[in-house]
């Protein structure tokens, strides 16, 4: 049996390995508090669940659902972009529903990366930005996100020879793992850079509606000229607590959407129809509940920020997303620290180097855990 090189050369997905490790500890009776994975622990509102139930209870909703999403869902996505960002998109050419945004992120590489091509990826950043190009036979060039620069990319630091080989640039704000937001002026700079170097700008925006302290996150498509170069990836996973439902979207440049759809139609057969119909209801329905849901996460964030100094960590309060990006004392090894805390306190925090070289010395703390367990995690860590 010959395993393909792309498999043998691909590192294990960090959270798949983590799941096995924590599962083994729990099987031995250890009460592990995992602050590692950003999987929302809250349910969607009942009206969304009811829509799924009604649709799944019908006899005519269980076949193949079509490759491009229902017209109603595409229109709901377009309506969301108009209401939320003031951006007009054509539901028939500039919108593509996804089986969760993650598959779109990976498939985008197969649409735009040939062997020898380069994807410009943030470091630290979501691992799929780099793994997609690797699977497609291309390379990734890390763009450092440094705390002293507000975790924003310095486009001027990208070498000209790298830019000449690049076909794709990835950005993600509110950012995973750092939690920072990006001003429109920065997004304009990114759009201009992609125009100059003939790149497709892939903007991952799943946390745009999960923000704190009154911060309102933009869409890159708000920038003049963005649709000439940009595709924005979004998801109902975080905004609507629908992570396991696997429903997301790509929105933007029609040519890029078409290229992505060619890959997708050769790989999958579309999103389960009841999930599409529930997503349509979610996007078109009452949005006021999101404010209170965000306050839940903000209270959790504040609990973590309160105990960080007690365990020797520090962080900037995140503007959005589901994480606190905590810095260890100078010279500390994040993997060793996290392993020690898991063994001695039964608390897991993800080492920052899982997101790239620039994540060394940091830990990502997920807020997807109830307040009392977050407080307990802080007590356990402070007693080590």
Image (cartoon, rainbow, N blue to C red):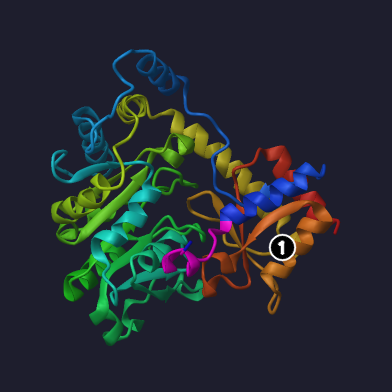
Left or right for 27, reference 359: right
Q: Is residue 111 visible?
A: yes
Left or right for 339, reference 175: right
Taking depth in this image into account, of 115 and 182 the one nearest to the observer is: 115
Residue 181 lies, with reference to residue 137, above or below; the image says above
- What residue is drawn where x is 54% and y is 39%? 40
**Outermost residue toward the right?**
383
Residue 317 lies, with reference to residue 169, above or below; the image says above
Q: Residues within 10 Å of mark 1 (few under 14, many from 20)?
A: some
Left or right for 20, reference 288: right
Mark 1 sits on what residue? 338
Q: Position of residue 347 (x, y in %)?
A: 74, 52
Q: How many numbered tags mark residues here?
A: 1
Q: Which residues are magenta?
A: 2-14
Q: Position of residue 255 (x, y in %)?
A: 14, 55
- What residue is drawn where x is 41% and y is 38%? 246
- What residue is drawn where x is 18% and y is 62%? 229
Q: Position of residue 126 (x, y in %)?
A: 46, 60
Main SS, magenta region, reads loop
**Which quadrant would residue 4 be assigned to in this image?**
bottom left
Q: Position of residue 181 (x, y in %)?
A: 42, 58
Q: Quadrant of the C terminus?
A: bottom right
- Does 157 lie within the magenta span? no
- Does 5 lie within the magenta span? yes
- What residue is drawn where x is 76% and y is 44%? 26
Q: Is residue 285 visible?
A: no
Taking depth in this image into account, of 162 and 297 the one nearest to the observer is: 162
Label 1: which secondary element: helix
């Amino acid at each position: 049996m010959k395993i393909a090189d792309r498999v043998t050369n691909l590192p294990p997905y960090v959270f798949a390995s983590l799941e096995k490790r924590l599962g083994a500890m729990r099987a031995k009776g250890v009460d592990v508090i995992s602050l590692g994975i950003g999987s929302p622990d809250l349910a969607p509102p009942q009206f969304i669940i009811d829509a799924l139930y009604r649709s799944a209870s019908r006899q005519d909703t269980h076949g193949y659902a079509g490759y491009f999403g229902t017209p109603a869902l595409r229109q709901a996505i377009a309506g969301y972009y108009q209401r939320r960002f003031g951006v007009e998109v054509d539901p028939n050419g500039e919108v593509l529903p996804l089986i969760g945004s993650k598959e779109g992120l990976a498939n985008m590489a197969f649409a735009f990366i040939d062997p020898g091509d380069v994807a410009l990826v943030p470091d630290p950043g979501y691992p799929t930005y780099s793994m997609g190009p690797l699977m497609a036979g291309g390379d990734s060039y890390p763009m450092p996100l440094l705390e002293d620069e507000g975790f924003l990319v310095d486009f001027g630091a990208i070498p000209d020879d790298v830019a000449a080989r690049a076909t794709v640039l990835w950005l993600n704000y509110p950012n995973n793992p750092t939690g920072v937001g990006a001003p429109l002026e920065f997004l304009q700079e990114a759009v201009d850079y992609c125009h100059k170097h003939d790149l497709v700008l892939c903007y991952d925006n799943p946390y745009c509606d999960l923000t704190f302290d009154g911060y309102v996150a933009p869409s890159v498509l708000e920038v003049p000229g963005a649709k000439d170069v940009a595709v924005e990836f979004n998801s109902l996973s975080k905004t609507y607590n629908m992570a396991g439902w696997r429903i997301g979207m790509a929105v933007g440049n029609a040519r890029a959407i078409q290229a992505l759809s060619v890959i997708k139609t050769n790989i999958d057969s579309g999103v389960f129809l009841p999930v599409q119909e529930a997503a349509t209801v979610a996007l078109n329905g009452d949005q006021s509940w999101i404010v209170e849901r965000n306050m839940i996460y903000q209270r959790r964030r504040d609990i973590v920020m309160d105990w960080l100094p007690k365990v020797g960590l520090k962080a900037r309060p995140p503007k959005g997303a589901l994480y606190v990006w905590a810095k260890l004392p100078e010279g500390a090894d994040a993997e060793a620290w996290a392993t020690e805390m898991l063994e001695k306190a039964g608390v897991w925090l993800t080492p920052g180097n899982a997101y790239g070289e620039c994540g060394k010395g940091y830990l990502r703390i997920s807020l997807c855990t109830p307040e009392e367990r977050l407080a307990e995690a802080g007590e356990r860590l402070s007693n080590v």
